[in-house]
Image: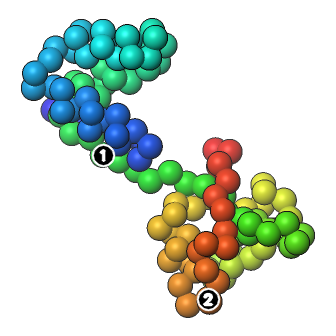
C-alpha cells in the first residue's frame, strides 16, 4: 500500500487524476496532461505518476507567515510568544509560520478580524 503526503494546493490535481484512474492508464493520463500543458516538466510528470500510483493520499495544510494588511503599522508581522500571546514584528524573519486554521484559532477572542491580515509565503 502506497501512501503519499501532499500539500493542500495539490488537492484539485489529485482529484482530477483519481477520477481518471479507473478508465485510463498512467501513460494515457501523462499524454493528455502533456498536451494540455504543452509538454510536461519531469517534476510534474513524476508528481502525476506518484498521485496516480498512490493508494492513499494525505493532504497537509500549508504554513504561512501572516501580517497586517495596512502599511500604516511599522510592526506588521505576527508571531507567538511562549504563552501563546500575539506579538508583532517589523522583520518577517521573526514571524512564526502558521496554517490558516492555526492563525484563526489564535485570533479567537482577540477582537482582531481575520480579514485584517494577509498571508505571506513562508520561506521554509
Q: Nearer the viewer, residue 81 or 12?
A: 12
Q: Position of residue 68 (x, y in %)?
A: 74, 69
Rendered-image quadrant of the N terminus:
top left
Q: Taking 101 as reference, is 22 left or right?
A: left
Query: Residue at the spot x=41%, y=47% of the render?
Result: 8
Query: Residue at the spot x=30%, y=9% of the render?
Result: 31
The answer to whether marks 2 and 1 mark residues whose Cβ atoms lie closer than 8 Å is no
Q: Position of residue 48 (x, y in %)?
A: 34, 23
Residue placed under numbered mark 1 in the picture: 58
Q: Which mark is residue 114?
A: none
Helix, strand or loop for disc 1: strand
Q: Nearer the viewer, residue 109 or 95?
A: 109
Q: Taking 61 as reference, is 17 left or right?
A: left
Q: Quadrant of residue 115?
A: bottom right
Helix, strand or loop for disc 2: loop
Residue placed under numbered mark 2 in the picture: 110
70, above or below 91, in the image: below
Amino acid at each position: 500500500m502506497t501512501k503519499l503526503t501532499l500539500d493542500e494546493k495539490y488537492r484539485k490535481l489529485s482529484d482530477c487524476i483519481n477520477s481518471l484512474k479507473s478508465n485510463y492508464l498512467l501513460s494515457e493520463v501523462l499524454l493528455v496532461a502533456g498536451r494540455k500543458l504543452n509538454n510536461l516538466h519531469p517534476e510534474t510528470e513524476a508528481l502525476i505518476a506518484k498521485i496516480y500510483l498512490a493508494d492513499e493520499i494525505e493532504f497537509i495544510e500549508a504554513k504561512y507567515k501572516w501580517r497586517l494588511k495596512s502599511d500604516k503599522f511599522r510592526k506588521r508581522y505576527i508571531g507567538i510568544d511562549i504563552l501563546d500571546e500575539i506579538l508583532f514584528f517589523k522583520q518577517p524573519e521573526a514571524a512564526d509560520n502558521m496554517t490558516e486554521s492555526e492563525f484563526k484559532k489564535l485570533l479567537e477572542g482577540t477582537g482582531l478580524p481575520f480579514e485584517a491580515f494577509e498571508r505571506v509565503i513562508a520561506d521554509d
